[in-house]
Image: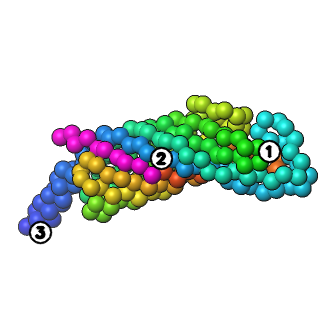
Amino acid sequence: MKKVLIIAFVTLMCVSKAEAQVSFKPGIRGGLNISHFTKGTFSNYGYYDYNGNYISNAPDKYNSQTAFNVGFYGALHLTKYYTLQPEIDYSKQGSYDESTKTKLTVTYLSLAILNKFTFDKFNVHIGPTIDFVVDKNFNADSEVDLAFILGAGYNFTKEFGIEARIKKGIIPVIDNSNANHTNVVFQLGATYTFDIK
């Protein structure tokens, strides 16, 4: 009986301690986007570009362009090492079409669910995001993108930190007879978490 009481007491203490670690803190984030479309493949027979023009024997050359991202997040700290972090982000992306000397820009409203693993001041985060097109300057083939985020961050204080991310889309932005081109975005920015008690 004594052993049962001891085990029950230890279990209760562990559960109470775990519940005490759970907290929710909102925050803001923003920074630089360096984005491009994937290269795809090339056919010697030519293809139609994103504006319906026939391109003869000319491979796609999509180079990087710079833009920005800004958003809000909610950090749900479930344990000392794990945080579930939903986000809403405004992300301006695209690519520079070297063959036509055109800057292709597409802007998304992104809804992400990240799994953040924290080790002292460092963290690693990974998760999916669904991106909805809110603006574009060319005939993108899709109004939505599904992407995956992998990133790492460093917290200077409980409130302020920096992070770097790579976001890779899987739904083609440009889908022509020659190739499918998807989003690739490198993000470098800062975060601020509000220390709400």
Does residue 153 appear to the left or right of 101 in the view shown? left
Q: Is residue 127 left or right of residue 138?
A: left
Q: Quadrant of residue 52?
A: top right
Q: Which residue is mark 3?
A: 3
Task: Tell me the residue that label 2 is attached to.
Answer: 32
Main secondary structure along the magenta-highlighted residues: strand
Measure the C-alpha gap from mark 3 to mark 2: 58 Å
Observer-nearest of 117 and 167: 167
Three-letter code, disc 3? Lys
Amino acid at circle 1: Asn
The numbered mark, 3 or 2, whose residue comes first in the sequence reads: 3
Quadrant of the rendered image containing residue 174? top right
> Which numbered mark, 3 or 1, is in the foreground of this view?
1
Label 1 sits on residue: 176
Q: What's the magenta region?
A: 188-197
In three-dimensional space, the C-alpha distance between marks 2 and 1, rounded to whole angstroms, equals: 29 Å
